[in-house]
Amino acid sequence: MKTRNNPFKVPENYFDSLEKDILSKVNSAPKKKFIFFEPKQMLRYAAVILLFLAIGGTLWWNIPNKANKPQEQYAKTIKNLHSDSIGIISKIEEIAQNETKIETIANPTEVKKQESKQQEKELKENKLELNENELEYLEYYLNDDVLTDYLTYNDVKL
Amino acid sequence: MTDNELLSLLLKDKTREKGFSLLVKNYKERIYWQVRHMVLSHEDANDLTQEIFIKIFQNIDSFNKESSLLTWIYRISLNHTLNFLQSKSQRYKSNIKSLEDSMLDNLKSDKYFDSSDIELKLQKAILSLPEKQRMVFNLRYYDDMPFKEMEEILNTTQSTLKSTYHFAVKKVQDMLLDNEKDKFSFPN
């Protein structure tokens, strides 16, 4: 004959005692409440945040500085070289000026020549040089008021 | 008392304890046997049943009414039992003896078990099944649970559950001798 017996047994009055046990445990166990910030969780979050801050801080203070150091050193070297070269140039110029002063003191005719050359240069800069044909052409129109006004306005010295 | 009436008692602070007392009265045996058939030992089943009911009491507010109260209770019970077995089997990983062998040995000396040879053979065959297959087999064989109800509890389609069960029955029958097979009635 086919059977489907339950081979498992329980102690006598077990289910009555089970009910009592469960109810007594439930009354003594605290009811699970939803707490947004549990102390343990708070500590975990705080630890994670501190860890991130520590890693971030280390990266922020060390890695970029290390990366900039060669650049800064390069910039300093260039700056020093630049200032050195300026110093050298100014010294060369100073020496050159001193040399010309010595030359002029030693040769007074040379000084006069230089002065006349300078004067000629200034005159050329201020004067309008015209050839003969141009002068004739201008003289032809000399009485013309428009031309006179133009020349006056443009401060052209003939 | 219907599950809805029971639930309305459980969800009110004033009537919660009364409602819970009724819930324990209604479901204690079903839950105990479901657990016992999985863990085999009375002591383990007793501890787990108490833990399951405490869990139900603590989480009753999170019951969303999408399933029936029975389905929700069974889900908690099955998950709790599977977690227990899995953590226990982890402890047996380094042992020469498997958890299943140890369970079978304990069963032989269990005073709350009819330790006839044929029953021991059946338990040995059931223990050879994978955990989830064993769960489906037990729910159908011992609790006579319809596949429709199982579908809701285990969140698996009926066709999958049916094939799982029939495969399990075949395996169990293969482990029994012909004259032994006839002594057990496996529901379809």
Image (cartoon, coloured by chain):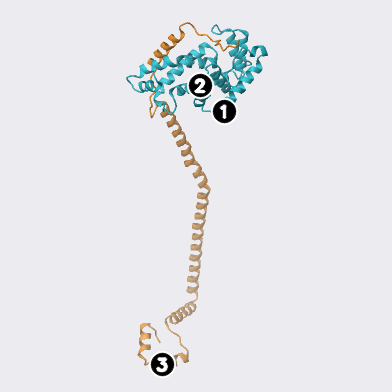
Location of residue B29 in the rendering, given as x and y in whole percent from the top left corner: 47, 14
Q: Are marks 3 and 1 in contact (CB under 8 Å)?
A: no
Which residue is denoted by mark 2 in the rendering? B78
Q: Nearer the viewer, mark 1 or mark 2?
A: 1
Q: Nearer the viewer, mark 2 or mark 3?
A: 2
Which residue is denoted by mark 1 in the rendering? B159
Location of residue A54 in the rendering, given as x and y in whole percent from the top left corner: 46, 36
Under circle 2, the secondary element is helix
Q: Are marks 2 and 3 in contact (CB under 8 Å)?
A: no
In this rendering, do the residues under marks 3 and 1 share a single chain?
Answer: no
In space, the residues marked 2 and 3 are separated at their CA atoms by 123 Å
**Which residue is pictured at 48% across the width and 21% down the height?**
B74
Residue type highlighted by circle 3: Glu
**Residue A139 — which label?**
3
Q: Nearer the viewer, mark 3 or mark 1?
A: 1
Chain displayed in cyan: B
In space, the residues marked 1 and 2 are separated at their CA atoms by 20 Å
* Quadrant including the C terminus of chain A: bottom left
Chain displayed in orange: A
Q: Nearer the viewer, residue B139 or A44?
A: B139
